[in-house]
Image (cartoon, rainbow, N blue to C red):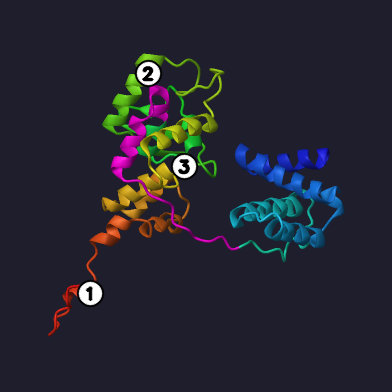
Amino acid sequence: MGKLRDQMISDLCLRNYSPRTIQAYTQCVFHFAKHFRRSPDLMGEHEIRSFLLFLAQESEASASVRKMFVAAIKFFYRVTLNRPQEVERIPYPKVPKTLPDILSHEEVAAILDAVESVKYRAIIATAYAAGLRISEACRLRARGDIDSARMLIHVRAGKGAKDRYVMLGERLLVLLRQYWRQTRPQGLYLFPGQDPDQPITPASVYQVFKKAVKKTGITKHVTLHTLRHCFATHLMEAHTDTRVIQALLGHGSIRTTSRYTHVSAELIGRIKSPFEALSLEKTPARP
């Protein structure tokens, strides 16, 4: 499906999809075609349903993975092939709304302390301190993105190709200056990879992060994206306005941000049950 793949990539680029999404969508359609060993333009709704059932029942793919396949296939048939009728009745799978594990302030500090490299500590600290996706932290530019005069970080082309500003704290600025003095990074990016003209990859950072988590003995299920959840939850616990958190995270909808009101166990623990205000003639017996 060489020509169709090129056409799909062009269609995605024209609509400003991110490189990561373009790669994921084209891979999904490739696996769909590979499953039947036929070009996808020779198939339709019947094959699409059969493939999605295969993912759900035989491959036991998660709902979130299947949702991505549906999105990719819908785009391909609606836009690239201009055959929207093939996917009109294809539903998105219902994705369970699970709550992520949240690290305490002490646990975040322990992980950062376990990172020996000042470069990786600076990247991971930036992701948490500013609520950045790790890809956003990796792509920060050495000049122009860290505004120490206004104490702001300029995040370029975040999710949805949107720019935004986030806060630059004093402690983070000290760490970034320490990193700069010790490494003097060359090229465009603040955190360059092996090729100084390219940013460090999120995969490289994750390997260091995973080792640091193991070193601390923390048993919660945490990833680099967990730090973004922690950033939002810790701000929520500090009574920061939800609309401010929405702007900092770059969420398009307040509904996305509102999920953190359900995450904060500390906030829930502070709330008094109405039962506590009852005047009972008989006080509950102690066990």
Mark 3, Cα crowd under 10 Å, few <14 / some 14-19 / many 20+, is: some
Mark 2 neighbour density, 10 Å: few (under 14) some (14–19) many (20 or more): some
Q: Identify the disc placed on residue 223.
A: 3
* Callout 2 secondary element: helix
Q: Residue furthest front?
A: 287
Residue 156 visible in the current orientation: no
Q: Please name the residue shown 59% across and 63% down the image.
A: 94
Question: Disc 3 vs disc 2: which is toward the camera?
Answer: 3
Task: Give residue 274's mark.
Answer: 1
Task: Say which mark, if any, is on residue 180.
Answer: 2
Q: CA distance from mark 2 to mark 1?
A: 53 Å
Which three-letter amino acid code belongs to the residue tagged 2? Answer: Trp
Q: Which residues are magenta?
A: 94-123
- Indicate the amino acid at tag 3: Thr
Q: Position of residue 39 (x, y in %)?
A: 85, 47
Q: Amino acid at mark 1?
A: Pro
Q: Earlier in the sequence, mark 2 or mark 1?
A: 2
Q: Which of pointers 1 and 3 indicates the residue nearer the eye?
A: 3
Quadrant of the rendered image containing residue 211? top left
Residue drawn at x 28%, y 58% as measured from the top left: 267
Earlier-in-chain disc, 1 versus 3: 3
